[in-house]
Amino acid sequence: MIAFENVTKIYNVKGVKKVILDDASYRFADRKNVALMGHNGAGKSTMMRMVAGIELPTSGRVRRTEKVSWPMGFARGFNGLMTGVENVRFVSRVYGCHTDSVLEQVQEFAELGKSLALPIQTYSSGMKARLAFGLSLAISFECYLIDEITAVGDRRFKKKSEQALKDKIKNARVVMISHSEKTIKDYCDCGVFAYGSKLYHYDDVNELLKDYRKFC
Amino acid sequence: MFYSIWLQIRVIAALTLRETRMTFGTSHSGYFWAVFQPIFSVSFLMTLFYLIGRQSPFGTSLALFFATAVLTLEFYNKLSVSLMRAFTTNKSLLSYPMIKEPDTLFARLSLIACTFIVINVIFYSGLLVVGLGQLPAHPERLIYAFLTTCLLGFGVGSINAILYQKNQAWQHIEKIFARPLFFLSGVFYIPSTMPPEAIAVLKWNPLLHVVEWTREGFYSNYRSDVLNIAYPLGLGATLVIIAMFAERITRKQRV
């Protein structure tokens, strides 16, 4: 279960106050693939980070009983001084996974070869994204967070990662941010629309897209 | 309940391993230096004092008398300083929702405590080997004193971490308080033999009590008039409680 309970999120940067959510309560339908839509700057990514537990609400609480991934392709949680292998080991230990089997899967998927034994700071951003992507697939989350990115890497790797993610979410669900109607239709069963610091639920993705076209 | 305790232990264990890697580097010589750097610096200091012909204020071994105070202080300083940066250097870890900031503090505490157990064992056995040491008369008191130092160092270090993240200038202010500790903790003298006016001031230093406790642990006939174990224990526990509350209250401002 993922739910927002009376969540208020306010950013206060240099005297500019920005209200992302104002006392919003919302329960993400269980085991459904949920689309999260809204105009640019509505705070979709912030909400996703709150779902992931990276960011805390200003008030209220976010309840999370399933194993939620970090936003896919997001590689901020790596330590640049540690090698790829060490980072993978650390993350799988934290999530209570079998380190060797996770490492094996990441090695096979990310195709980083010997680079995996080098410190992450020597990686290109594409390599980091591949590692993060491979790692989130190997950990087997119950809910994958997708912020626009459904695939990483070059053309060939993009195809492979997209397919791997599709396979993975047969046994998991996604919460997805996207501006592409096709992607939303492809992946999602229902949706939520962020508008004016509130959240609106839609059982039907087509209804959501209709309102999205109207307001954004 | 049981699951969350297990999760906590798992997270702290993973963090401790990571801390180990970050502190010591990849090479084995990293471990060597982490253990032997304090040992060498204390030994160097002692050699200097031997050379200028200083007599031990208590017992026959100046080295042992010194070590009881200096190693305790080193341990405390290491805790209070490296915990201070625990939040700022571990910011990226908060991407993993099960890692909470206190976990990074606990991980550093366990790594440093383990390192200092090794340091203490090596140092005191080294003294024994070269004939400057002795077996502790009351080993259990050494353990209590060590644990109390953990408590104090953890409490102060955690508060440092919170203040340092609020304002980085705290690292300089903290130094002002930490510097005099070397002179106030009975490194060169027996506190009980000081004039009452001095004792009235010195006894407010919790580390002095821990040093005295350590000495009572080592020497069978060391009687401290200053030592009051309730003080460092109570102060340490209070600091830890304050730190944990303050961390929880200020968490939202930090993330």
Image: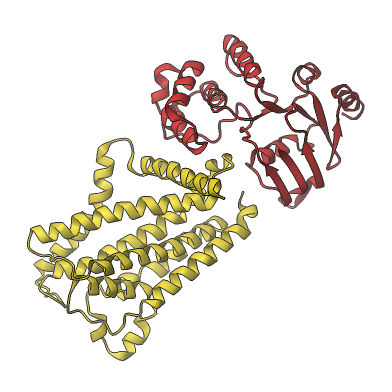
Chain colours: A red, B yellow
Q: Is residue A145 visible?
A: yes
Q: Which residue of the protein is positioned furthest toward the left in this rendering?
A: B131
Furthest residue in direction right, as rendered? A214
In the rendered structure, the answer to whether residue B37 lies left or right of residue B5 reads left
Residue B121 position within the rendered picture, expressed as x and y whole percent measured from the top left: 21, 56
Task: Work out which residue is located at the far bottom of the displayed protein and give it.
Answer: B196
Q: Position of residue B222 (x, y in %)?
A: 20, 79
Q: Residue B153 location, x and y as percent?
A: 40, 63
Q: Is residue B180 left or right of residue B71?
A: right
Q: Please state the horizontal and vertical placement of residue B245, each as a whole percent of the image.
A: 58, 63
Residue drawn at (14%, 70%), measured in percent from left and top? B62
Q: Nearer the viewer, residue B248 or A9?
A: B248
Q: Give the quarter of the image for residue A118.
A: top left
Taking the image as drawn, is residue A79 in sight?
Answer: no
- Give the position of the N terminus of chain A as an image quadrant: top right
Q: Which residue is the extreme one toward the front?
A: B2
Name the residue rendered at 86%, 41% in the picture: A196
Q: Vertical placement of A209 versus B217: above or below?
A: above
Which residue occupies the foreground of this view, A79 or A30?
Answer: A30
Relative to B21, A20 lies left or right: right
Q: Quadrant of residue B217?
A: bottom left
Q: Quadrant of residue A137?
A: top right
Compared with B98, A152 (above or below) is above
Please tell me whether residue B232 is drawn above or below residue A140 in the rendered image: below
Tally of marks: 0
Q: Nearer the viewer, residue A49 or A94?
A: A94
Q: Residue at x 26, y 63 (%)?
A: B71
Quadrant where the C terminus of chain A is found in the figure: top right
